[in-house]
Image (cartoon, rainbow, N blue to C red):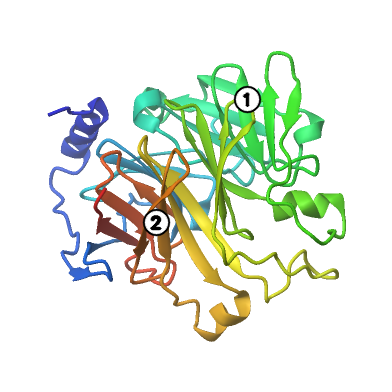
Amino acid sequence: MKISKYSLVAGVFYALLFCDIKSSKAQVFSPDKNGEAIELVGQPKAFSSGEVFLPGFLNTFGDLIIIQDDADSMVYKVFNRHTLEFIVSFGKKGMGPNEISFGPTAVHQDIENTESFEFYDFGKKRLIKLSLENILANDIANFSQYVVFPPELINAQLAIFLDEDHVVGSGGIREGKLFFYNTNTESIKYTDFIPKTKKPLPTDRDRGYLYSNKMTVNREAKRIAVVNEYFKQLEIYNYEGALVKTYSFPDTEEPIFYLRESITSDETVLHYNGICSTKDFIYASYIGFDDIELEKLNYDIPTEIHVFTWEGSLHKIIKLDRPIKALTVTEDNKTLIAVDPLNEDMPLVMYNIKP
């Protein structure tokens, strides 16, 4: 049995810091519609600064999980994913070397194999890679790798390193759906806006925001999976920016554009709100309702998880018993951890799923 060194690290931290604390994890199970078990995990326990309020980003590695808290989005926190005991936090709001200026975002990534974690500091326009050793030592001043984006990419909202010299990102870029940035030559390549809209958008900038994507990367296969809130379609790109495969559902409707106050109207159906992956599968969380319908039902609409292969075929659909916001799946494809946005007391839910 392979034991991750970060599982061992978690054990050491837990033994030193929380040896007199017993786990209060709820053991409540109920079947979902597919007969797969759900476990209500509860609220991760932090230190004296208070508990996580509502996680907005999750990423597992070994026995640990990184959580970005919506209540304090400038801080990332690391927990033992089994006991939910706090391990360490890193980052705080500010412009200093150990601080995050504004709006950090992270792409779901293979942390354990790369032994690093990356996030994009929107305020500083800087993509940062940190070693796990530095994270667990609460030292983020020493970057493993970083790049400051040029003016052409100033509106980027999401990015991740593909290798030492190349970055992929998206969001708010009027020239293309994705951008591929060579940090050595400073050249930028843009992909087409796929699927293309039939009606023109109010401005070119609106196109960039309409195509703000959810991304995940398979570094072993050198593939990038992309889904979008306004299109019911999966796209897979290679590292050169070529579209390798798309999966489109036959009932997909074009977004309804609203030309005055926002890009879309309240009647625009919302599709994907999250994505994560393992080396085997892509997991995308699907909504399928517009804002009017969601408000009528108090946003209490169960989420579907669309599971795709990295070859671009639909593997299966998991129908959950509640809405979820953020998600991560363990590398063995057996455990899905997600955020229930309607349950502040027990925001984390854990599903035993079948590969």
Amino acid type shown at disc 1? Glu
Pointer 1: what residue? 240
Compared across the picture, whether 205 is left or right of 334 comes to right
Up-down relation of residue 100 to residue 265 (above or below): above
Q: Quadrant of residue 104?
A: top right
**Residue 238 percent coordinates (x, y):** 56, 30
Q: Amino acid under label 2?
A: Val
Image point (37%, 71%), residue name: 322
Residue at the spot x=73%, y=70% of the render?
256
Q: CA distance from mark 1 to mark 2?
A: 39 Å
Q: Residue at x 52, y 26 (%)?
A: 129
Seen in the picture, residue 266 relative to 134 is either above or below; the reply is below
Quadrant location of the N terminus?
A: top left
Q: Is residue 305 left or right of residue 147?
A: left
Instruction: Answer with left or right where residue 43 lies relative to residue 161.
Output: left
Q: Residue 98 at x, y = what percent?
A: 54, 31
Q: Quadrant of residue 99?
A: top right
> Of callouts 1 and 2, which one flags the residue occurring earlier in the amino acid sequence?
2
Q: Say which mark, if any, is on residue 52.
A: 2
Camera sees residue 101: yes
- Picture coordinates of residue 66, whole percent (x, y): 39, 42
In the rendered image, the vertical position of residue 148 relative to residue 72, given as above or below: above
Instruction: Give me the residue at 82% from left, 62% from top.
Output: 199
Circle 1 crowding by C-alpha within 10 Å: few under 14, some 14–19, many from 20: few
Q: Nearer the viewer, residue 145 or 112?
A: 112
Q: Is residue 239 above or below residue 333?
A: above
Residue 6 — which label? Answer: none
Report helix, strand or loop for mark 2.
loop
- Which of the two discs, 1 and 2, sits closer to the camera? 1
Q: Which residue in the rendered view is the most extreme toward the front?
A: 250
**Looking at the picture, how far across and down is residue 253, in whole percent?**
65, 67
Say which element carries label 1: loop
